[in-house]
Amino acid sequence: MITLNDYLYSGDTVLRILKKYIADLRISAVQKHNEVDLVHCNFLIQIMKLLEHNDFLTSQSQKIREFYKYMAQEYPYLSFTFKGRIKSLIRAEGKFNGYIVEYIYDYYEKNGSYPSVPEIKERLNCFRDLIAYRIVISMPRCHMKQKQDRKKEEIRYLYRIANVLPQFLEERGFTAESTGGVKRSNSLLLDDAVRPYYRDYIDGESTNSYRSLHITFFDNSARCYMEMQLRTKEMDDIAEIGVANHLFYEKKQETSRGRRDAILQGGCIYFDEAYERCRLLQNLDLSGVDVNMFTAVNNSLMNDGCGLFRGRLILRRCEIFSVNLDLLETVSSFV
């Protein structure tokens, strides 16, 4: 079986690694008549094309910056950051194979049999976040009245921003994609007109403390999908360095082991290979890899200049606004 891990010790660039991995995986898929690996190849080609031909990101990012300017004018009392990235190679590979493992396991648990190849291929058509942008907001304490609840105020502003974002971007050539009911929001702060587009991880209970709003757009100019995430600074801290990040990893390890125990090895070749690729990535010691423009002391401390483990930045803007005293009353009564 061919895995990404086999190509991480040659000193090659990420692009060169992708080309080698795709070529060898395709040869193996053809020889073994493995249609799922052919889909895998096509998925990796999407990443490769993003790295090779990303001029469109300049135009796309410019349209995102227009919303940044809109927020600066409409919410001058908020601090906020805009970030954009292309999904890293390791995380993309892990997510693709993780989808296979999850889908086959859930199907087997429900039906007592394995899904057909067309069903697996259909499930793998759901990737929409190879390009993603994130808006993180914070309300400075100096702009709050003494008895105001900062968390509640920030969440109110987050939903206000979410309510205007779809139309703003649709006027600039994007199309908001329906979630099909996945993580549909029940929040009274979200307008009914935009509710079908958001996956709401804020409203309701979460098993790992992760909280965020997600929405997917199709860029009609670039002919590609992109995801946008909206969070408060506290939500972003929890996701990036807090309990959500740690618990998610622990839960992922535990769940993965449980799925391997439930499906006997040899029962489904697509599950076996995807599971093994996920296991190898989860156990990868990043300090030992040899990839051009990547150095790691351990799996937390690293300098990733190539997008191997951390996404390649395509947009990063930060604003910290101060307001005069005349605006304080507006802030306190807003929403």
Image: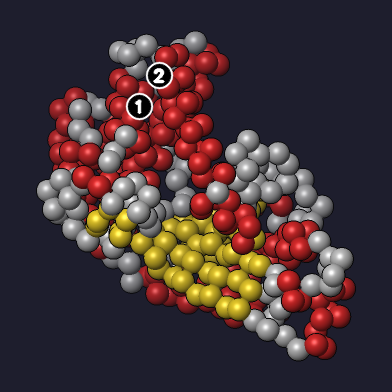
Q: Nearer the viewer, residue 77 or 203?
A: 77
Left or right of residue 315, residue 18 in this image: left
Residue 51 seen in the current view: no
Q: Is residue 3 left or right of residue 116?
A: left
Residue at the location (46% across, 71% down)?
316
Q: In the displayed structure, would residue 8 be above or below residue 236? A: above
Residue type at numbered disc 1 = Tyr
Residue denoted by label 2? 260
Residue 40 at what x, y percent from top left? 30, 39
Question: Left or right: 328 with respect to 164?
Answer: right
Residue at the spot x=14%, y=54% of the render? 12
Q: Nearer the viewer, residue 176 or 89?
A: 89
Q: Position of residue 56 (x, y in %)?
A: 38, 70
At label 2, the amino acid type is Arg
Tally of marks: 2
- Which mark, by number, is residue 318? none
The crowd level at tag 2 (other Cα within 10 Å; few <14, some 14-19, many 20+) is some
Is residue 139 at least partly visible in the picture? Answer: yes
For the N terminus, the quadrant is: top left
Q: Residues within 10 Å of mark 1 (few under 14, many from 20)?
A: many
Query: Badge 1 is on which residue?
Result: 275
**Residue 152, x across and y down, in percent:** 78, 59
Residue at image coords 73%, 63% = 154
Q: Are marks 2 and 1 in contact (CB under 8 Å)?
A: yes
27, above or below 161, in the image: above
Residue at 40% across, 19% down: 260
- Residue 327 position (above or below residue 130): below
Picture quadrant where residue 294 is located: bottom left
Please state the horizontal and vertical placement of residue 149, each as a whole percent of the image: 81, 61
Q: CA distance from mark 2 to mark 1?
A: 8 Å
